[in-house]
Amino acid sequence: MLLRHTPSEIKERNALTINPAKTCQPIGAMYAALGIHGCLPHSHGSQGCCAYHRSTLTRHFKEPVMAATSSFTEGASVFGGQANLLQAINNMFTVYTPEVIAVHTTCLSETIGDDINQIIRKAYEDGKVPEGKHVIHCNTPSYVGSHVTGYANMVAGMVKYFSESTGRYRDQINIIPGWIEPSDMREIKRIAKEMGVKIILFPDTSDVLDAPQKGKHMFYPEGGVTIPDLRSTGDSKLTIALGPFGTESAAALLDTKCKVKYELLDLPIGISATDRFISGLSRAACVEVPVSITAERGRAVDIITDMQQYFYNKKVALFGDPDQLMALTEFLVDLEMKPIHIISGTPGKQFVPRIRNILKDKVPNANVRNGANADLFLLHQLIKNEPVDLLVGNTYGKYIARDEDIPFVRMGFPILDRIGHSYFPTVGYSGAMRLLETILSALMDRQDRDAPEESFELVM
Amino acid sequence: MEHNIPKPPTAIKEEILSKYPPKVARKRNKSIVIRDPEDEQKIQANVRTIPGIITQRGCAYAGCKGVVLGPTRDIINITHGPIGCGFYSWLTRRNQTKPEGAEGENYMTYCFSTDMQDSNIVFGGEKKLREAIQEAYDLFKPKAISVFSTCPVGLIGDDVHAIAKEMKKKLGINVFAFSCEGYKGVSQSAGHHIANNGLFKHVVGLDDTVREGDFKINMLGEYNIGGDAFELERILELAGFTLISTFSGNSDMGRFANSHTADLNVIMCHRSINYMAEMMETKFGIPWLKVNFTGAKATAKSLRKMAQYFGDKKLINRVEKLIRNEMAAVNKVLSETRPRCEGKLAMLFVGGSRAHHYQELFNELGMKTVCAGYEFGHRDDYEGRDVLPDIKIDADSRNIEELFVEKDEKRYRPRKTSEEILELKKKGLEIGEYNGLMAEMSKQSLVVDDITHYETEKLIEFYKPHIFCAGIKEKYVVQKMGVPLKQLHSYDYGGPYAGFRGAINFYQEIDRMVNTRIWDLITPPWEKNGAEITAEFVSL
């Protein structure tokens, strides 16, 4: 057994996290920053942080992930990192000529108390920032929240630095996606185009972290939201924010700063959440839902009605990030599956009540935990006490899946051992179809594997 | 065979430096050396990375927890800090391990962290650490627990060592801590040193049991990536050596505790573990030999050196027989793969020893390493240990503890008299020596320490190598340029590459990578043959 020391008896822990279901803020900020065109993310701290984040993002996307670091030494840790950051800004603009440098902090620089606002001001004053180029930042102390918080903070940083209200009305809708894949961002843009709605999607990592092989490395790939587009978000009609944990702070800031109202929705994963997204977008832009979208929905629902027997009352354990889990739980309930264990390492008070509300009729006694000590060790123990038919989560779930012999669907971050997530969406109706296919394949492969020879089925 | 070596890299070096701000150019100049074997060349290494330059390097925590302690299965490694450091070092280094039976201890699949929150940063994290150690003990009853400090821990002043000591006393098991904050030193290398010190202080020598067997050795600096240690264990057993311990591939704490009973230390990765060898020599009288099990010929040579050290006729014969047997299989594969690889060019930018060792494998394939360097090597890894007295201790090295080690009064036992050592040295056995990477590199090849991303791209354009070896961060950048990249940290999830079978794996892997046709798919036919199509229509 790979996790041979995990006992089934659950004892509350106060201090020790074992097998986390989250990671730290800066990696989220780095991911979000890659969704700005021509942006070089910069990690203000020890160089190990930057190396770890780049490695993890690279393993997940199988793509180049460019980012720089302030390379703190003991000296910088004592005297502050201003000199390092100023030098870094100068070097980055000289050697790598980005449009924007997006600085995020680390637990080290936050503990020292480096004032990034002031350092960036100094960089401008000292002439280290070439004309027309930008340095933005957000604070991402690793000892608060999770990687999702870091993503949210960098997205809010984009609003803080770029969004402006010129008084000129623009017939466009801002869409702020929570932490989703480049494939999902591409899908949201496709849906909006299909509906004839002009949107500004930010951040947008499509065509950045799913860049085509051309025999040439584009240091700044073609994708990413542009600075003019980011500026214009302050003149948009409305913001649709998808996933409260990843987006609400940015949407609220845009409202405060530029008086652009926002509608907060779930990530459009599954039928019901996508219905709300499509309705919301249609309402906001005053457009009818086109027949093509309705047909997509019909195809997704068709799979569900055809294959319902394979979903019905199957017990599922889920772990990952709250925005995904809230939408996914609802989807699974729509499928009449039973999500019985749900774990997220990301703290946040609205998570448990929201999930409980979704589950109130189907699984009133589900185990739902997030925040401190809500980790994969606990999830594994819960599964040992009440086994499941399916496990959904990031790659780390494979150790539990193998030990307990549970069908496993990879979803979330990071996925280090399979491809697909960055190319095929899980949002929208077509994303729902992909999820249905992967879940069905996992369940039906298991049925095939375990069926006695006499009841092995040709047609299923 | 003439290699297709481009013109000397003088102009490209100038071009690269001219892009940098003057201060940066001056500094990088000293880390980029055009090789001239006739000259006693110096290279600047193990110095601070320039902020903003885009480096391959990681931090001291990664070197200590990830590299040296990570591969040991029966210890609970608790990361004291915010969640990230523990998370990123969780199972990502491919250290394979074989626990003893279904019940044997193995915590390597687990990640343990104190997940420090802002209140711990403000009020201190000692209480939480103490509680975490207790909880780990209550749950698992391990024989040892260690604590790894992350950046904020050093800043807020948590006394991890005092807590470890207190909990050791309370729990009656071995508990010890490492001050391996990420800002220590200038790279992972600092963490290796800190890890060596910790293991030496808290573990080595705890168990004096003398195990049975002849020709007892420890293998140092072998981390069992992709099963390397398994292959070496196989070879060493067949050759007749008794492996007391490995630091630290496929290792357990009991073996470390007993490692001072060996009669020879052999060093694979000089950079990460030479401290341990030196300290064991001083305290217990165990000499060390630099070996290289990367490459079949290098493996054979290393085994011969080890046999020569013990000087036993039977052992020497057994080693020769093993080499004969193994080389038959090796040569069979080499004769198939070498003709397809010969003359091709390689670039290697990895680690503190691999950029050197893997040149052996490429040599065996008839491939030429035109450009190489370490991510975190020191000058002695480049220029050889003769340079050690010359290396100035700077502020970043000074903050890494240098243990004061003395002869152990009871247990010091010189394995060889100084006369015997002299005699062996006269016969060409380089005991306690390492000549470094530069000695391997031919005239006008290029050596670059702590290569930057910019230099990587420029040098690939210049050399157009057939293969580039580095790590995951470089993997897809280089491949986007149409050049295959072999990861030499993770082996691209393949391996083993050490020893004889490892060499066979590597030949086949490199043959695949430099001869595959997949790269021809990159250009679509309408871009490749556009002109021809037009011409065909014209001729119609």
Image (tube, coloured by chain):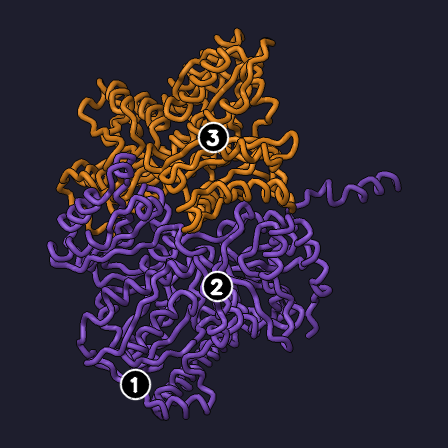
Chain colours: A orange, B purple
CB atoms of marks 1 and 2 within 8 Å: no
Tag 2 secondary structure: loop
Tag 3 secondary structure: loop
Relative image position of residue A120 (x, y in whole percent): 52, 33
- Nearest the viewer among B190 and A364 is B190
Q: Judge depth for marks 1 and 3 and give the one in front.
A: 1
A134 lies above or below B131: above
Q: Which mark is residue B377?
A: 2
**Left or right of A355 in this view: B12:** right
Instruction: Say what amino acid the circle numbered 2 marks.
Output: Gly
Residue named by callout 3: A425
State the separation of the CA atoms marked 1 and 3: 64 Å
Relative image position of residue B466 (x, y in whole percent): 62, 60
B61 lies above or below A370: below
Q: Which residue is farthest right? A: B539
Residue drawn 57% across the image and 66% down it: B43
Residue drawn 81% across the image and 44% down it: B532
Residue named by callout 1: B415
- Nearest the viewer among B118 and A211 is B118
| Crowding near the residue tagged with mark 1, few <14, some 14–19, many ≥20 C-alpha atoms within 10 Å | some
**Left or right of B145 in this view: B25:** right
